[in-house]
Amino acid sequence: MATTICFIIWAVFITDSVWTRTVRQVYEVHDLEDWTAQDLDCPRECFCPPSFPTALYCENRGLKEIPAIPSRIWYLYLENNLIETIPEKPFENATQLRWINLNKNKITNYGIEKGALSQLKKLLFLFLEDNELEEVPSPLPRSLEQLQLARNKVSRIPQGTFSNLENLTLLDLQHNKLLDNAFQRDTFKGLKNLMQLNMAKNALRNMPPRLPANTMQLFLDNNSIEGIPENYFNVIPKVAFLRLNHNKLSDAGLPSSGFDVSSILDLQLSHNQLTKVPRINAHLQHLHLDHNKIKSK
């Protein structure tokens, strides 16, 4: 029982650790007297709550352009609009931005002006889900900790895109159009602190190469992965949560040691083509094998 409780506490910590900075910053206390001019600099298309003077709410307003962002803003909400471009000018005074939510817009790579994002030297969280991106945008600020790109059309990762993002802890590329040829051996070089990598719902047939050594959560559900190379997990010795549900894994596609990896605590292999239970490590806490071809003897 004690072991199970410790595992649950540890798992919750790992899963949520990349979000703790968000919660902490959102509830920071600011002196309202510092923002006496906030009503004057608030864009007319948006809402500036007096109780949260570092936030700017511009979501769900049918905007086609990003308004000029006041210098006092830390948190910018622009989701669910009709924005197609990210130019430099609206952000020229926004040197304090920590958080930008641009989910559910119409942004393309051609619409992102070079330097528009990299100039935001304090940016920690960038949300660009549900847009029209065909490749991972670059350059990005070195300060970035989370990059959310789910549900775009990403099929390319330009060389060197991640080379300076040593602070990134979470990279979400799920539900895109990634093929195996999107990756080079050095694609993920530079992501020294990456903890969670999500590439579920793409079109991968092979495991991605040379993942960052600190990766703890690897999500590859709903691809077409057929096998795992021998000694694949040697380069990610800290991986604890591995999801490979809804792939094409067979017994022959697994390494001889199977999943005998001491760091793995939660292993999900449902909806594959396995006919027997793979070799696992004694430290494993949760194993999911439903909807395979395994038969009891």
Image (cartoon, rainbow, N blue to C red):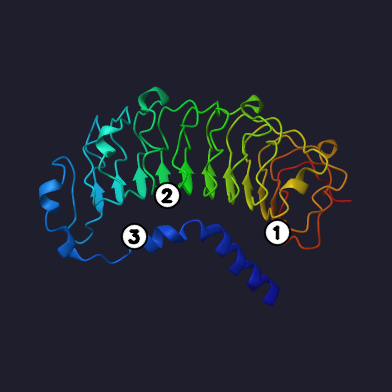
In front of the other: 230 or 279: 230
Q: CA distance from mark 3 to mark 1?
A: 32 Å
Q: Sequence-wise, which precedes: disc 3 or disc 1?
A: 3
Number of residue marks: 3
Residue 141: percent from left, percent from top? 44, 41
Residue 226 lies in what quarter of the image? top right
Q: CA distance from mark 1 to mark 2?
A: 29 Å
For badge 1, the amino acid type reads: Leu
Residue 54: percent from left, percent from top? 25, 55
Residue 281 lies in what quarter of the image? bottom right
Eye-nearest disc, 3 or 1: 3
Where 92 sits versus 261, above or below? above
Labels 2 and 3 touching (C-beta < 8 A): no
Circle 2 SS class: loop
Circle 1 SS class: loop
Q: Identify the mark at residue 265; answer none if there is no mark.
A: 1
Residue 233: percent from left, percent from top? 76, 47
In front of the other: 178 or 245: 178
Seen at 67% across and 71% down, the residue is 4
In front of the other: 140 or 65: 140
Q: Sequence-wise, which precedes: disc 1 or disc 2?
A: 2
- Local packing at callout 1 (Cα closer than 10 Å; few below 14, some 14-19, many 20+) is some
For badge 2, the amino acid type reads: Leu
Query: Would you name the residue on which mark 3 appears?
Result: 26
